[in-house]
Every structure is written in C-alpha cells, then in structure tokens.
Amino acid sequence: MSVAGAEVARFGRPIKGPSALGGDARRFFHLTWTLAVTEFKLRFFGSVLGYLWQLMRPLLFFGVLLLVFTQFVKLGNNVYQYPVVLLMSIVIYTFFAEATGGAVGSLVDREALVRKIHFPRMVIPLAVVLNAYFNLLLNLVAVFIFALARGVNPRVSWLELPLLLLLLGVFVTGIAMLVSALYVRFRDMRPIWEVVTQMLFYASPILYVIERIPKPSLQKAVMCNPLAAILDQVRHSVVDPHAPSAAAAIGGAGRLAIPLGLVVLVFVLGFWLFNRQAPRIAEQL
Amino acid sequence: MVVDGVSKTFRLPREQVHTLKERALHPLRRTSYETLDALRDVSFAVPHGEFFGIVGRNGSGKSTLLKCMAGIYAVDVGAIYVNGRVSTFIELGVGFNPDLAARDNIALNAIMLGLSPRDARERFDRVIEFAELEDFVDLKLKNYSSGMQVRLAFSVMIQVDADILLIDEVLAVGDAAFQQKCFDVFHRMKDEGKTILFVTHDMGSVKRFCNRALLIEKGDVKLIGKPDEIASNYVELNFGRDAGRQEEGTERYGDQSAEIVDAWFEDEHGLRQTALPQGRPCSFRMRVVFHRDVKLPALAVLFENDRHHHVFVTSTDRMGTTGHFEAGESAVFSTTFENAFAPGRVYASPWVARSGQDLLDRRPRMTSVVVTGTQHTGGMVDLPHDVALSRADEPAAAEPSPA
C-alpha cells in the first residue's frame, strides 16, 4: 500500500480543491439542470407576455430581414422557401449567440455561488448552454409550424436535425468554456466576443445561401466555419433537398474534416483551459 | 477530519491588469503583486462527533481555512482529509433569488447544498414549518423581511444531511425565539454525534457549544484547546494591542496651576496595561505636577463606561488630609481595587482641586482600559457574589410564629 493509500485509510478521503468536473455525476446534473431551469423561469416571470417575447425577438428580426432581403436587396430571389431558410438560420444563430454570449460573464455573475459552495465549476457555463437549448427548442416549434404552413414537406432527413444541433452544442460548449474561463482574467473578452459573434453572423449563410457566393474558393472557405457548415446542412436536410449539402458545398465529404476538426479543437482547447483555471476561479473573481 | 500542514497564499496584484491591451502594452508588469500568506502550516485533527470552534480576529485566516476545508479554495501546500459527507454553510441562502417564490428558493438552495431534487421536495414542509413561514410560501423572496429570509435559509440548511458541517458565523440570526430554536438545533446535532466545525467571533457560543477550539492569528495557529482557554486568549488578543491609545479626552477644565500630566492603569504586578482581565486586582494611577503652592489638594477619579454611566468614583477624601505641596513638586495618586467592571471599555476622568473649592485641573476621559471577560451580564459591574435557591414550599407551620 502506498503512503497516500495508508493516509486515506487512516484519515478518510482527501479534500480536493475545486475542479472543472469531478465529484458526483448526479449532483453535477442536478445543479446544471436547476440553474438552467431557474434562469429560464426567471426570464418570463416579470413580463406580461412571457414566452411570447422569447419568440418575438427572432420573429421581428426575421420580419425586418425578410423585408429588406426580398424587396430591396434581392438576395432571397430564386431561393426555394427563402423565408423558411432565413427563419431557421436566424433561430439557430440566436442559439449560438445567446449561449456563447451568455457564457462570457457567467462565472463572474455567479460569483456568489462560486465563492460560497463547492461544486464542479463546469456546471456554470453548461447551465448557460442548456438554458439556450430550452429557448432553441421553443423557437423551433414556431419554425416548424411556419415551415409546414408554407408547404415544406416533412421528410426522413429531418431526423438529421437533432444530430446537427447536438454537434452545434459541442461547438458552443467548447466556446463557452473558453470564453468564460478567459473572462475571469481578461475583462475585454466581452467586447471581443461581441465583435466575433457579429462577424460570424455575416460570415455564415444566414442572409444568403451558400451557392450565391460567386467564387467557389470563397464558398469553400466559408464552409470551413463549423457554424456555416451546420446551417447549410440544416437547410439541405430540413428545407430543400436540392440545395447543396455541406459536403457538396465544401467540395467533398473528406473536406468536412475541417469544420469537424475545428469543433473538436475548440472543445478540447476550451476544456483544457477551463480545467486548468477551475481550481483558482474562486480566488480570481 | 484531519488538516495536515496546510498553507495558502493569495497573490494580490498591486495593479489589477485586467485587459489584453494593458497586458500587451506592459508585458512585464504582471510580476507586480504582493503575496499574502493567509494560512501558514496549519495542522489539526477533529475526531468524529466533536464540536470544534475556529476563532480569530477579522482577516486572521479563519474563513480561508474553512473554504479550504470545504474545497472552495485549493490549498498550496499540505492536505486535508475527511471521513464522511461534508456540507458547508459559508453564507445563508446560497443561490436564493429574490424574484422567485419561497417554494422555488427552497428547492434551489437545497440542491445547491447537495440535496437531490426529490429530497428537496420531500423536506419542503419541514423547512417551512421550522421557519414558521406557512403563510408566505408563495410570496416572492424580495417581499420577505430580511429576518424572514434568514429564517428560511437557516431552515433549509438544517435539513441537509451531512456527517460534517462547516459553519461560518450564522448563529446570530432572527429574533430571540428563533435564536433559541437554532441553539436547540445545534444541541441536537451535537447529541446526534455530528462533527461540526464552527467559525465565529462570539466567545459565548464557543463556550456554549464547542468541545475544543482553535485560535488563529495572521494565518498561524496560536492555540488549540479548551473553549475557556481559547476565549480568554482571544479576548486578550483582541484588546491587548491598540486598545489603550484610544481617543484621549482633549477637554480640560481648571486653571492648571496643578497639572495632571499622566494617568494609567496597572495590573497586579505593577505593569502598565491597556487591557485588564476581570476579577483580578488592578490599580489606577495619575501623576500631578504642582506649579503653585497648594494646601490640602483633593485628587479624585471617576470611572465611566462607554455608555457614560458613572460606575465608580474615589478620591483622597478617603484618606484624610493630603498635606501641603510646593510649586515644582509632583505627586502620584493611586487607587487599587479588584477589577469588577463589566467587560468593555472603562474611562478614567481624573481631577485635582484645591480642597473643596477651586478646580485646578480636570481631564475627562483622559485614559481608558479595556476590561476583558467573556460574560456579558448587562450590568455595569460584576461583583463577586453567591446565588442560592432553596425550596420555599415547606409548610408554613415550620416557620416560627410571632405569637
């Protein structure tokens, strides 16, 4: 028996400092769930229209964009079911922006918890992502009602959507870990991330569809962005089977390794950084 | 629970470098920080079932120690071992949200403290009952009075089952009746054989609950021992230092043809002190310099407590005549007594007068001393006394009748 083992037998288990994961998996889940649900509830408590606001924001945004890009700038002409594609993309982008943007300040905002109780630190950014998922699901209900009303036919390939959203979730979680851990030490993470999110909005096929990009090389470059690849694949599998799939747009299924690799890279990097920071977060707030 | 040689150092940046721009412009500045040794080689062991107090002044490191034990801070050196489930109460009502109803907050707080959602629901009624808030279950927390919030939080806390509880000064909550209830709970926990580590300033509760206690000062363990011992050491630590130099009264009356130049307290060994333990002999002395001839001066001193109550007065009248002092002479007045003042600050206002008439010098609150003791009875003095109680229900016939 090692020395450490003998000590554990004599004194009980050692108390470890705070960590990113660690501890009881059930408690981890309960905490994440409770935080996300509470946040979700709070959003709609004080306001009269409650859930409607959650829906109104992307819908109003959608209305304005639809008007501009079908009437003034003819970006949406000759695109099959352009309004549905636009709404779907906006809702998914909203999820992305909400989850990552909310994660930036999450550790600092939850200072009271971080400094007062012992729990795996990862709970906090994960709860933000989970809360964003709740909102996404509600918004998707509206999107599908809209799509069916516009005559988009249900297809088996709709089943791809949960997988794609899960993949997006991995990407978003990676970013959430990265930015929340960085924000503890560098407060300018917030403006930086706001700009990046803004840029990603225009760099992803939301207002336009991918085949409208004139240069094929530029098309392929845009598709390297995981958000763009996921949005394009959602359009292909949910709305328009004749639209180029992500694989087609990037020029071969093999090349999908680039956006996929980026997702994995961001996740690993985020996890590594968060894990490294976790024990000291309480002191650095 | 065993704490083995734990040290903890905080790095306090002199200039908080918080933005990337600053970091990019001043890449070398990051080395500028001070270190603060919050804990230095702290070791102790608490056996199962003990009620263990941790006391110390503000900033002595006791809360840091508790946070290390709770796993909120990572320790730099050393290790902490624990046998059993630990629950920490650094603050009441962690996770409480003012915009939610009490019902939701109970669940939230209980889950934060480590209960499963199902347990939290099951114990809901007990929490509400203990907090005596049955009528306010669906009221938003922001509409609660602060006392009600604290009661609610405390009620949740005691529902959490753990073998080892780490508690950071949460005893002073609620009204008297609720406080009694809390004390009952602590006694019950003690009886149930739970191990409790308890951080506090309140020596009363240390003596009341703890089996043993630890005194920590500037990150070092000063003493581990019996509550009484710790309590008296703590009080000395608290008042020993800067206590005496407190606001010397600047007011002055009289023509100063005799001057009180110095006044001080001494302990039983004749050493000047700024803090004196209750119940021990002590002295007050003042030195007077006469600038003119004074026949039969009267010297006196009034002791006041911090509420301006005149507690005790004595003077040279007690000793008959004082004599004749010539210009340039000086004299020392002293009075020795058993220190029966209630714990707290005692001020001395000495004066010197020409026998019965003109005031020569009076210096209100010229000096003060802190009386240390651990019991606060509410009185101005604690005289040595006995208390007896005997049954009075003997038949009246037993008493000698006047007839």
Image (spheres, helix red, strand yellow):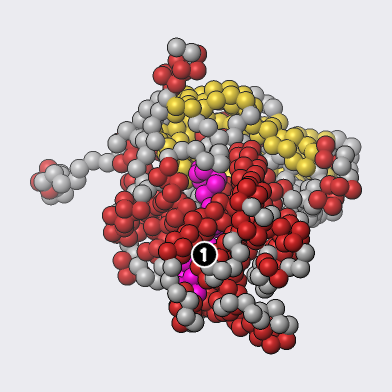
The magenta region covers A117-143
Q: Is residue B399 magenta?
A: no
The residue closer to the viewer here, A276 or A59, is A59
Residue at 37% from the left image edge and 39% from the top image edge: B162
Q: Is residue A7 above or below residue B145?
A: above
User: Measured from the top left, where is residue B281 in percent x and y?
Assistant: 57, 30
The residue closer to the viewer here, A28 or B194, is A28
Q: Is residue A74 above or below residue B222?
A: below
- Determine crowd level at label 1: few under 14, some 14-19, many 20+ residues with C-alpha closer than 10 A: many
Looking at the rendered structure, the kind of residue marked 1 is Ser
Q: Is residue A132 magenta?
A: yes
User: Measured from the top left, where is residue B105 in percent x and y?
Assistant: 42, 61
Q: Is residue A259 above or below residue B330?
A: below
Residue at 78% from the left image edge and 42% from the top image edge: B13
Quadrant in which the N terminus of chain A is drawn? top left
Residue B196 visible: yes
Q: Give the SS element for disc 1.
A: helix
Kindly identify which chain the residue marked by label 1 belongs to. A
Residue linked to disc 1: A237
- Label count reads 1
Residue at 45% from the left image edge and 74% from the top image edge: A153
Q: Is residue B365 above or below residue A71?
A: above
- Position of B101 compared to B345: left or right? left
- Position of A178 compared to A29: left or right? right
Furthest-top residue in view?
A1
User: Measured from the top left, where is residue A207 in percent x and y?
Assistant: 67, 73
Residue at 33% from the left image edge and 40% from the top image edge: B189
Q: Looking at the magenta stretch, what is its main secondary structure?
A: helix
The residue closer to the viewer here, A223 or B258, is A223
The residue closer to the viewer here, B117 or B232, is B117
User: Measured from the top left, where is residue A234 in percent x and y?
Assistant: 55, 64
- Position of A143 compared to B57: left or right? left
